[in-house]
Image (cartoon, helix red, strand yellow):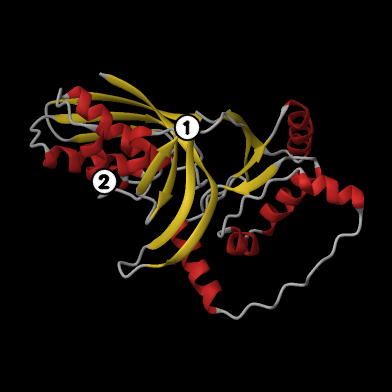
Amino acid sequence: MISLKAWAKINIGLKILNKRNDGFHNLETTLTTINLADFLDIEEIESGIIIESEGLNIKPEGNLCYKTADIFKRRFNINKGVKIKLIKNIPVGGGLGGGSADAACVLKGMNELFYLNVSNEELMDLSKKIGSDVPFFIKGGAAYARGRGDELKFFKLPRMTLILYYPGYPISTKGAYEAYDEYILTPQPEADNIIEKNDKKKKKFKKIFALENDFEKVVFKKHPDLGDVKAHLIVTGAFSVSLSGSGSCLFVVIDENIRKKVIKYLEGIGAQYFEVVTI
């Protein structure tokens, strides 16, 4: 049996460039793994694919792990079956890449289980058939991503300490892209030019490094509670607060002093949160 951890990710900024002819979108973003993980046990069985996971109310055939195992078996002509036990810790629909991370672990785990010695490069190429984020999770770490998110340039990112806020509900990535496409086709009112005259506020906002995520334009309209929480977190003194991917999770960049203020606020509203670091 092979046991693996599927690390989650955050998006440090996300720019949607345009819609492609294949229906997907070109984007620019920086991805980095964090130490929040799902757990997978993969073992060989005589035949078939069995998925065991508590809390996932979908048919096994609709699970991305099932699809991935099926693609892997077909690609490498594997006659034996696999049983995959999945323990979910990454919030579903949180913009943290949990499903893609799980799929990448299935590829790596089956590669090890059946002693195939397939290279990471070949696994990354195969994983493009499964999902745009999956190639990144084959290696993990930090990478600048373009195209559908599968054109990757890996680099070393200094360690960051973060708090993730999960609002308790998922957001559909497909739905978020559809809302964004509708948004850019709809004339938008010109934003007011606001001149901040308060010196104290000026100094405060200089502490915050800007992380722009284009999804916030539409996600915060549909879920104004997320915008409210972001505003309150910035008031606590957080260095930066941003939606990860299409949401629903926000991440907060912190140090030890800010950590206490952020946690006090989140606990005060009864929020679910995770303390994590980039890895």
Does dot 2 land on a helix, a strand or a loop? helix
Q: Quadrant of residue 25?
A: bottom left
Instruction: From the viewer's perspective, tell me whether residue 17 is left or right of residue 1.
Output: right
Count of marks overlaid on the render = 2
Q: Residues within 10 Å of mark 2 (few under 14, many from 20)?
A: few
Check the picture and name the quadrant holding the N terminus.
Answer: top left
**Image check: 72 left or right of 8?**
left
Tell whether label 2 touches label 1 (CB within 8 Å). Answer: no
Q: Which residue is mark 2?
A: 61
Mark 1 Cα-neighbour bin, 10 Å: few <14, some 14–19, many ≥20? few
Outermost residue, top side: 1
Element carrying mark 1: loop
Give the residue type that dot 2 points to: Glu
Relative vertical location of residue 211 with respect to residue 261 in this rendering, above or below = below
**Quarter holding residue 20:** bottom left
Q: Is residue 82 above or below residue 92?
A: above
Q: Position of residue 132 (x, y in %)?
A: 35, 50
Across and down, in percent, residue 127 comes to 27, 44
Q: Nearer the viewer, residue 53 or 263?
A: 263
> Measuring 75% from the left and 51% from the top, which residue is drawn there?
231
Which badge, 1 or 2, is on the more N-terminal residue?
2
